[in-house]
Image (cartoon, rainbow, N blue to C red):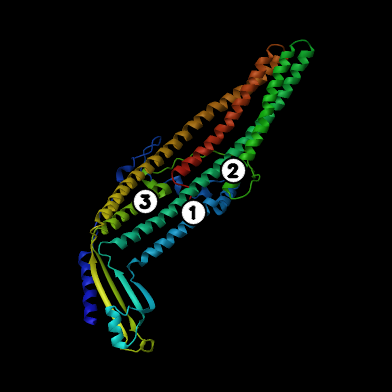
Amino acid sequence: MKNHITKIVTFAILITTLISCKVSKDIETPKDAFPENFRNASVSSDTTSIADVEWKNFFTEKDIIKLIDSAVARNNDLQIAEKNIEIAQYRFTQSKWGNVPQVNLFVNASTSNPSDNSFTGLNLNQAIGAKHIDDYSAGASLSWEADIWGKIRNQKKGAYAGYLQSEEVKKALQTNIVANVSRGYYNLLMLDAQLDIARQNLRLNDSTTNIIKLKYDAGQVTNLAIQQSEAQKLNSAQLIPLLEQNIAIQENALSVLTGSFPNSKQRSVRLSALEVKNNTAIGVPSTLVSRRPDVKSAELALKAANANVGITKADLYPALRITAQGGVNSFETSNWFNIPASLFGTVAGGLTQPLLNNKRVRTQYNIAVAEREKAVLAFRQSVLVAVSEVSDALVKVEKLQQQETFLKEKVKTLQQAIKNANLLFKNGMAEYLEVLTAQANLLQSELELADIKRQQLTANTDLYRALGGGWK
């Protein structure tokens, strides 16, 4: 018996050594998926990027850091992603046991009552003088499949890629959360600034209305002037509750991101006090695969697809399985553990080749190949989106700065125009409509200027996120 076992094991090792090879060739990440440089960026071979900066160093406002800290620690979506990583890690650990033989202990007891007219029943009665036979067994069974075609190896590769992919999904989620928190905070500062502008404009409208009333009493203007001035004042007053409503809604949105119930958010700085950074270090497009979690995730999806092709291809070839069983067996309980008389053992090994289900297995292989081709296209698409987002952010940073320059000059001109209009109106050298028009234009321009500042801050955040920053 020992010789038989030795022959089977030797045969398995020989087959595994000589035949073991890769039955499918992996597809590499396409190198031509990346452009040489980003649009709207100067040509540079410098690989340094603002995405390498940790978010605690990229954002300098203490209120933003406090909000992001809370979001990273308490956001429910991030905690779900953590659990997905944990599950993927368990699956990868489980896949490591694919090459380990499966061993089971067993204890069996059975009784058989054949018919008296059956061949077994007649022989049983003659042999032992009984109408039934019992059987008692105890022992261990072993089953092992040789990884001839790399099937188990590919299963481990696929599980490992899935584990790494779950980590990248969490990183991508965190980059979005960090960006959304900062956008929400900058939006709050803009709404605060616009609320101050609306209140200041309301006071200015009050002053203008009082002057028009004095002129009305002097018979210099009609009642229509008072009505139009009152209407413009109400227009400014209407903005105040609208802005207060938007502030509360934005604070509630930030509360959801930070995993807390709706409450007010601390702002210890004004929008005008924030400096818009000039982030020029962006690196080259090919570094996105190491910095952007979604691009890295798409690359890992391709690796998992490669592994699945290897698994389904291996199913087309013969599988070598070795089974063994041994223990004690007896048809009487009194002799069940009588050693060595009750000892038994069996060893078997063989190659199994799919025949009738070959078409189904081949279809699974063809599906896996098509899924791999999809993974390549998905990777290319992820790169296209990433490069496009970086280019969008770059042009926003540049053009918003130009818009702010023009808008600041416009606000300055309108502020002077209001002073002149009020002076001329008091001296009877300008119509009241000129004063009201100047005030309305100034209100709109100041609101736009606050929004432009918010857009600039957000564009810098978008550039940071688009380059893959925010998860470190």
**Residue 253 - label:** 2
* Quadrant in the picture for the N terminus: bottom left
**Mark 2 surroundings: few (<14), some (14-19) or many (≥20) residues within 10 A:** some
Query: Sequence order check: which comes first, mark 2 or mark 3?
Result: 2
**Residue 81 - label:** 1
437 vs 86, left or right, is right
Q: Element at badge 2?
A: helix
Residue sitting at x 36%, y 44%: 378
**Mark 3 surroundings: few (<14), some (14-19) or many (≥20) residues within 10 A:** many
Query: Sequence order check: which comes first, mark 1 or mark 3?
Result: 1
Figure check: 182 above or below 224: below
Pick out the residue farthest to the top.
Answer: 219
234 vs 95, left or right, is right
CB under 8 Å between discs 1 and 3: no
Q: How many angstroms separate mark 2 from mark 1 (CA)? A: 20 Å
278 vs 6, left or right, is right
